[in-house]
Image (spheres, rainbow, N blue to C red):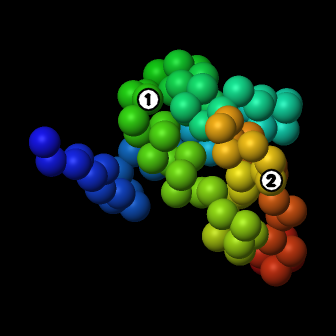
Amino acid sequence: MTKQHLEYHPDANRDDETTLVITFLSLIHGGFCEGQNALAEAAARQCGVPMRYALAVLRRYTSSDYRNHYWKVRDGSQARQSFELLPPNCSLAGA
């Protein structure tokens, strides 16, 4: 069985991706803590996109580097990942 890779095309589904990011921001800000897959599934349902696409977007914007990402995995149990919003990129705020 080969591992499938979801390719990211910057211009494809821009509206879906933006809507997903906003939905993730809202869910994380609201305290969603049921884990990565549950977060992706909740956002996918709300946005009407496939769960795999939502999971790919969630992973794409997860990191502790606030310059290119929006949230990070919160320290704690690895059995169930929860997420924490990163501070806004101050260098872009004034642009």
Residue appearing at x 39%, y 45% in the figure: 13
Q: Quadrant of residue 8?
A: bottom left
**Side of 42 relative to 86 (left or right):** left
In front of the other: 30 or 34? 34
Residue appearing at x 67%, y 36% in the figure: 80
Residue appearing at x 73%, y 67% in the figure: 64
Separation (CA) of disc 1 from disc 2: 25 Å
Residue 58 in view in this figure = yes
> What secondary structure is marked by label 1?
helix
Q: Within 10 angstroms of label 1, few (less than 14), some, or many (20 or more) residues? A: some
Give the numbered dot on residue 75: 2
Task: Find residue 84 and report its horizontal and vertical position in percent.
Answer: 80, 49
Type of residue at label 1?
Met
In front of the other: 73 or 16? 73
Residue named by callout 1: 51
Type of residue at label 2?
Asp
**Side of 18 relative to 79 (left or right):** left
Task: Find residue 48 and report its horizontal and vertical position in percent.
Answer: 47, 22
Which of the two discs, 1 and 2, labels the residue nearer the N terminus? Answer: 1
